[in-house]
Image: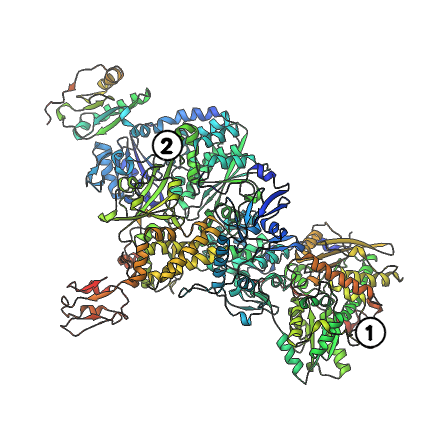
Amino acid sequence: MATVKNPIPTNQNLQSAINNMKLTIDNKPIDVAGGTTVYEAAKQAGIIIPRLCYLNLETLGIENKPAGCRICVVEIEGRRNLAPSCATLCADGMIVKTSSPRVLNARKTVLELLLSDHPKDCLICPKSGRCELQNLAVCLGIREIHAVENAEVSTYRKDHSPSIIRDMDKCVMCRRCETVCNTVQTVGALSAVNRGFMAVVAPAFEQDLQDSPCTFCGQCVAVCPTGALTEVDHTSRVIRALADPTKTVVVQTAPAVRAALGEEFGMAPGTLVTGKMVAALRQIGFDYVFDTDFAADLTIMEEGAELLARLRRMLEGDRKVKLPILTSCCPAWVNFFEQNYPDMLDVPSTARSPQQMFGAIAKTFLADRLGVRRDNLVVVSIMPCLAKKYECRRNEFKVDGNPDVDFALSTRELAHLIKEANIRFNTLPDEDFDAPMGESTGAGVIFGTTGGVIEAATRTACELFTGRQLERVDFQELRGMEGIRTASVDFNGTPIHIGIAHQLGNARKLLDGIRAGMYHFHAIEIMACPGGCVGGGGQPLHLGNADVIRARRQALYREDAQKPLRKSHENPCIQQLYSEFLDHPLSEKAHRLLHTRYFDRSVKIER
Amino acid sequence: MDSVNYNEREAPAGSSNGAGAGLKACQVQAIKNICQSFHNDEGELINILHKTQEAFGYLPPEVQAVVAGELRIPAAKVYGIVTFYTFFTMQPKGKYPISVCLGTACYVRGSEKIVEALKKELDIDIGGITPDGKFSIDSLRCVGACGLAPVMLIGDRVHGRVDALHIKDILAQYP
Amino acid sequence: MAIYKIHLLVCGGTGCRASESAAVVESLRASLTAAGLSDEAQVVATGCFGFCEQGPIVKVMPDNTFYTGVTPADAAEIVAEHVLKGRQVARLLYTDPQHKTPVSDAKQMGFYRKQLRVALRNCGFIDPENIDEYIARDGYAALATVLSDYSPRAAIDVVKRSGLRGRGGGGFPTGLKWEIACGRQADRKYVVCNADEGDPGAFMDRSILEGDPHSILEAMMICGYCIGADRGLIYIRAEYPLAIHRLEVAIGQARACGLLGADIMGTGFDFDIELRYGAGAFVCGEETALIRSMEGRRGEPTVKPPYPAESGYRGQPTNVNNVETFANIPVIFLKGADWFAGIGSERSKGTKVFALAGKINNVGLIEVPMGITLREVIFEIGGGIKDGKRFKAVQTGGPSGGCLTEKHLDTPIDFDTLLAAGSMMGSGGMIVMDEDDCMVSIAKFYLEFTVDESCGKCAPCRIGNKRLYEVLRKITLGHGTADDLEYMRNLSTVIKDTALCGLGQTSPNPVLSTLDNFRSEYEAHIFDHKCPAGQCKALKHYFILPEKCTGCTACARSCAVNAIVGERRQAHSIIQNKCIRCGACIEKCKFEAIQVN
Amino acid sequence: MEKIKSLDDLRKKRQELESQLRLREKSNAPESLVQIKVAMATCGIAAGARAVMNTLIERTAAEALPVIVTQTGCMGYCHSEPTVEVHLPGKEAVVFGRVDARKAIDIIEKYIKRGELLDGIIPQNYERI
């Protein structure tokens, strides 16, 4: 039939989807497995087709392919229209042209359209230099945009949250953030709203992100191709604090940062740059360079003590004890359960996160030691995370309005700061953290990966519970990349059931599973981001590449293995802190400084 | 494991989480009833919103939030739907909502002039409502009364073969 | 049971209801009762007669008298004269616009002479809210035949042999579509009726649903039997309250009779139908968007494949056909595939329903054999151009179609010829334009529609159509450049080539077809700053002929922006850059001194 | 509503209901039918045209004859009322005068069924008043 050129696939060619098939792409013959898209087939043939919206989040097992940008279109012989290569399956005998003049003209015209509805303030855009749209404009040589008088440019209110800035004027409707927020994280803060020219991704009622169910996990920022979603940048304010002679500025670095920072300087994923990072921070001008791992060990002391206390009560037959205990180090996870499980606020550990424990100790114990007034001590943290920016602003973590942690910079911001300071990072000599809050054990290091917190807690809890030295420190059963992992650890004859989830979607599944009676656990570790903090929203962009995340995790396990001390309770500086300042875990002082409360933050709509 | 008393908790009802603030209890209940009549099925969201708009006249945020809570879906999703379909409105309508057909048949027979005349007469824009809440103007695409073009609806009543010069007289029929 | 000697059929379609046909029905019934004739004459509210221009229509059977523009006040006279005394009420008879003579027999009206009613066979003939009338007209007999005499494959073969193609726009062969859905293995399959008719100026589907809802139910059941589905869904525009009501009534009656539900007519075949409402999104006429909308989501289309036949509603194989396509199915089984294939042109079989509107005398719903010429439709059925103006163009296919001109008048119209002429069949809107219509403005009108209705998912449609619209606006304001034409052509080609769904892929058609057929009009706007049709306000120039101006100052006093200057008793003049072209001065001038060009 | 439980039920129901629409079906294609027009002007009605018409309709309906009965205005034969015009397909129309119920049956039985002419035909050239 003359008008029908895109035939509906018949049973025969569906059959061929299972088998291998031969096709020709840009005159190259290629064999691919059934079910391969044209985009992937071209990649296998060494042809990278330009694309914008398409994103294969391998790690998460999810592909974002709305086929909306139409940049990756190709010409397929026999088809009336150009086909989006990302969403078109190969068929046997297909002849594909990825860069014919017809394709090039279409691709450039569509890109010109996208640019015609995009601000041209690249000079000061936070994404400049790593913006996928900008790269495309460079690659395809766009030199002018047809001028139409009074051409409308879609504009939206800019939304500043404590962690994330939404500048939707720069949105290209790739829908990656929507996919991540809904399908992966099941947070549901974002949805496509409006339609046509005014279509955009936004929270309900276009309210501020801060008033939405957003957890600030930052995974949307991590996948945004343009400057539409970016982190709140505090580098300038940190520089100002460093330049202020009245301020003493201390910095803490989270474990996951050292496994990824090198990538921003061209190093392979998983390169450990702990020593170089310390050197760089010192060179930038921080007065003291400390390690969040120290606070991670402290967290284990408190959280481990809490776990043991609850376990003991359970074994003594107390039926009211809150079990399983849930970890509380991940601020996006804390936000998530405050939003979604307001009936369960008494279940998670009350222990603050390492960042906040560090801040609280720094502004009391350390300030005292250094003889610096609280408001003259500036605590900066380097975090793989954007939710940490929100966390450090929470009122619970302020004393008389002064926050325990003043600024939380992301790994990306630190990389930028190092570049701004003109430091040749790659050739820096390794340096060590300062004492006392730079001392840490291997247990603190593995906080940066999924399963790490619970492994660290297990090392300490098991030894304290049984009173015997552990025979093996590595709990392989707690390590893995499955979205939900379950394991049992023998506590002297008592099996302790442990659940581990990373990504909030898996966390939801786990919690709903518990409610449905599918699981029974004593302890659960939850991290909001893929792979744990190594895949955090503040890390160098991994763009869904599972290998990058795996390499970062391995680096942390490597550092753990190299550490002379690997159990938090063996950290001499921690022991000293308790003896000189805190007394003992769960003491009154520890409660005041190291524990917190949770609030019902389920979304309320006010008129 | 009996000590895991966490399992004994009941999941909170969807709308106990504060959605619905600003609505009267009976209004919240009315929305819940509508949702239940569709078995709280997410797939019926559009039908549910139709019924809800029928009941409330429009779909303000607090109403959408209750629907979202009942169906256990994000409010953003409900909002995404409400803003996608032109039939749904977040603005209250006038006592006499006016809809001018801007379908092709009416367009070529001069419906634009009617819109202009209405805007001028009522001093509001399309999508607007008069300060006294009496009239609101909207446009729609084809009510299928093309034989009577140009056509305008006031409430349910169809005014056919409308002449821009007679707008004032037509409006005067509505007290 | 009383045998009525006279049936008074009153159109109860949306168009006529808007002109108070319901009151006419009441009034006729009251008059009959008053005259003691309620046992002799029956008043039936039917579906649309198609002749919407002059509603409300009352058709008197058996003598086929066609009364137009009937008001409730006319009822008494119709009863007293026609029913009682057999005398036609001459003043209510339809008057032929060309010969100015009243027509007493509807069959002699030009509007009906060339029509062939297949899909509309019951519209305006039966009471759509009475299943008995449908059954009396062989209703559900096709279903009975299929269930008793055909295997699903054999029944699909009948549809294939009939040559029926989808009436929703694309023209995909219906039998083939069913065959593909039939071949899929699944626990559950769905039959969907697409009643989301959204073309501005088109109301074919609405009229069928209002006039003959049971035929759609019957066809969906036949389809369900053929593809192995037991669920049907009708996706209908919420803007069609009457059609929704009639469908609800029909579904209720069919269920009550056991014609919907489990074990239909003892054959073991189960089928039930539910309604799903649209909510005002044109794009939901596209089948993948429609399915997403039925699932309670934003109606954004998805890439095909997978086609709905593979993965449709709730991920199950789903067959989507539009209302008019379904309306043809029962007749094909009653009269045979060969009968159907004998109507129409070589590759477009059967008839097509068009909504004829615009600058034409007989606005209404018509059904004609495929292959009829535009000339026959416009000048014979449509009765020619209104007010004796000159025909300029006819737009088919709605926002996806194009404008055809005088040179296309003798082209036989079917799926393929319209496509070849740069337009398309679409769902059947047909808008006639005369010399007063500016084709640049018409293109702008359609683009404005597309911009409003674009879902925003893909960039070419979301931004490209907006830019096309803006360029058109620029041209109508007299600011166009030669570059703009080149830019529009390239942009249109790329949008067609790259947009995700049918809406985007066809949206530039109104631009391309007007560029092809009316290029000189574009050039007049751009180079001469003139709108030949005199529609573009910004290109109008008002000026005063000094020899005619008496200096009465009436015009100057009427000018809201003080653009007219001149001393009393001396010729006035208009300051062009102040003039807002409102036309107020022309109305005030008694001496025809003010001219526009 | 009565359930249709089998294909036969549907067939029966259709047969029952068919007569309801027969009038409309017939008027769709009157050329192929016997068309009977009864003059129903005031004079006709006064002379009993209504009873004649009822007889014609009931009788033809009962026998399901291919007949369509319509009414018409005054044919001008006031002296011969009630008058009935019968138009057999392919033949000239014939007008019968002074028709009563009995004669109406005769018209059906003799003229319509068998084509036999009977008394009372008003010649076409007969003087009209």
Q: Nearer the viewer, residue A584 or C580?
A: C580
Using residue C586 as the reference point, say whether residue D28 is left or right of it: right
Three-letter amino acid code at disc 1? Cys
Q: Is C465 displayed left or right of A181 in the figure? A: left
Q: Nearer the viewer, residue C293 or C420?
A: C420
Residue A443 place in picture, x, y as percent: 80, 65
Q: Which residue is mark 1?
A: A573
Q: Position of residue A594 (x, y in %)?
A: 75, 71
The answer to whether D129 is drawn above or below residue C581 in the figure is above
Q: Nearer the viewer, residue B161 or C561?
A: C561
Q: Residues within 10 Å of mark 1 (few under 14, many from 20)?
A: some
Q: Is residue C230 visible?
A: no
Q: Position of residue C66 (x, y in %)?
A: 26, 37
Q: Nearer the viewer, mark 1 or mark 2?
A: 2
For this view, does C112 lie left or right of residue C288?
Answer: left
Q: CA distance from mark 1 to mark 2?
A: 94 Å
- The numbered mark 1 sits on a residue in which chain? A
User: Quick one: which residue is furthest to the bottom in this view?
Assistant: A245
Percent across and percent down for residue A458 are 81, 60
Residue to which mark 2 is pinned: C343
